[in-house]
Amino acid sequence: MQHHTVLKTSFTLYPPLGTLDPPHLRIELKQGSFFTVRPSPEFQSESTVPEWYPGNIYAIERAIPVTVPLPILPSKSVPTTYDIFVSGDYEVRLCLSFFFFICLTSPD
């Protein structure tokens, strides 16, 4: 038996972010199949299209985290909120629990 769901959470970046290059997110998603990062509705435009990235659905040890760009640059004057959507699958052999680790990085 298999079930599928899409889960949502949010995070906010507050200015000032210093003089960093545009930040990227390093995300480790365990037991989720895919994820996307989108600006919250007040920051979205008509041209904002989600890009889905792979998760570590089977929680394999030492899987490499995924580094992704933010869909829009954070504001330097007001807080910027982003939504994260996770594609969650449940099968008899998978638990429906997710682990996120998110950190801001400079692009390499």
Image (cartoon, helix red, strand yellow):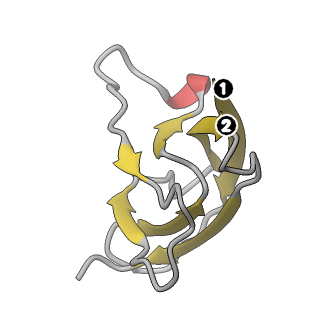
Residue at image point 43% right, 73% down = 65
Q: Position of residue 61 (x, y in %)?
A: 52, 82
Quarter of the image where one finds residue 17: bottom right
Q: Which residue is mark 2?
A: 90
At label 1, which amino acid type do we have? Met
Q: Nearer the viewer, residue 15 or 67?
A: 67
Give the mark nearest the N terminus, 1 or 2. 1
Residue at image point 68% right, 53% down = 12
User: In the shown orientation, is residue 72 left or right of residue 18?
Assistant: left
Outermost left residue: 108
Q: Position of residue 73 (x, y in %)?
A: 40, 51
User: In the shown orientation, is residue 27 left or right of residue 107?
Assistant: right
Quarter of the image where one finds residue 100: bottom right
> Is residue 106 visible from the viewing direction of this image?
yes
The vertical placement of 39 against 94, above or below, is above
The vertical placement of 48 against 102, above or below, is above
Residue at image point 52% right, 30% down = 43
Assign a secondary structure to mark 1.
loop
Q: Which residue is mark 1?
A: 1
> Is residue 71 visible from the viewing direction of this image?
no
At label 2, which amino acid type do we have? Tyr
Q: Nearer the viewer, residue 76 or 45?
A: 45
Q: Position of residue 58 (x, y in %)?
A: 54, 60
Badge 2: how crowded within 10 Å, few (<14), some, or many (20+)? some
Badge 1: how crowded within 10 Å, few (<14), some, or many (20+)? few
The vertical placement of 5 against 90, above or below, is above
| CB-based contact (under 8 Å), mark 1 and mark 2 | no
For residue 65, the mark is none
User: In the shown orientation, is residue 48 left or right of residue 79?
Assistant: left
